[in-house]
Image (tube, helix red, strand yellow):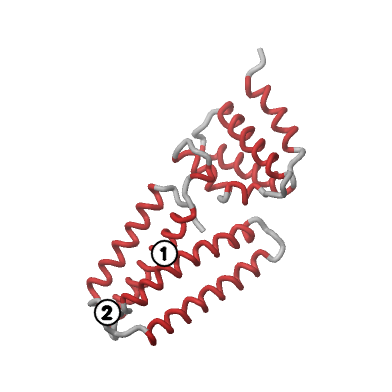
Amino acid sequence: MTTEVETVKPQIDEMKSDLTKRNLQYVQEVEKHLRELGQYGEEQQANMIYEMTEKILENQKQGVTARKLFDVTPTEYVKALTVKAAPVGETAGKWWIALDGGLLVLGAMMLISGVSAIFQGQTLGLAVLFVTFLVGGAAMMVLRKYAGAMRQGEKGGTWKYLVIAMVVILVWMTIMTVVQVIVPASWNYEMDPYPMVIVGALLLVLRFYLKKKKNIPNL
């Protein structure tokens, strides 16, 4: 008696032969992580790979790679499958990714500013921190796009990522400097160091919670 796996696997192999080298590598990485996870039976794995490969082939005709289609790495794709039964591309919207980046940068900057001010100097003003939050969210969106190209080994992907990262940092520092200069001190209130550290730590905890709750992928 022929099992479903024996029926599906030849079909998968046939579809794989039509994949580009990059898309085939993506599928193979997902297969590898599914095997290592050991959470799904052979039949389940075969069905998952079949459905995924079918979607990739449909979009490959329009020049869309698997990485761009799902907007996550193979590891994140498998992780998303274990979190909830939903299409990977719907695990977290772009606004959640931006919020994740904003909270990460804001929380880290508040911690650094607060700890530094405890020993010497003043904390960053709230206006500057608000700009930090906005720029951090935007930066996460931009860097995520180029980080994907770098991980996929696209030609010049690493250099593009490094250049964009430097540009983002330069823009961020410029905006922070301008805000500190032109915003009145009454609008740029400076918190005491200890509350600053506490709020910064709470923001990082909130970021960690939302990342798990909404299955927000890493950069």
Q: CA distance from mark 2 to mark 1?
A: 20 Å
Q: Which percent across, then down, holds residue 211?
A: 41, 52
Instruction: Using the image, tell me which numbered label, if any, was put on residue 190.
Output: 2
Mark 1, secondary structure of its residue: helix
- Residue at the (52%, 61%) spot, across then down: 141
- The kind of residue on which mark 2 rests is Glu
Vertical arrangement, residue 174 with respect to residue 56, above or below: below
How far across and down, in percent of the image, does residue 96 sit? Answer: 44, 54
Give 20 or 41, whichever is nearer the viewer.
20
Residue occupying image coordinates x 54% and y 28%: 41
**Circle 1 residue:** 102
- The reply to whether callout 2 and callout 1 are in contact (CB within 8 Å) is no
Q: Quadrant of residue 184?
A: bottom left
Mark nearer the N terminus (2 vs 1): 1
Q: At 40% across and 72% down in the image, what residue appears?
A: 132
In the image, residue 31 lies at what x, y percent?
61, 39
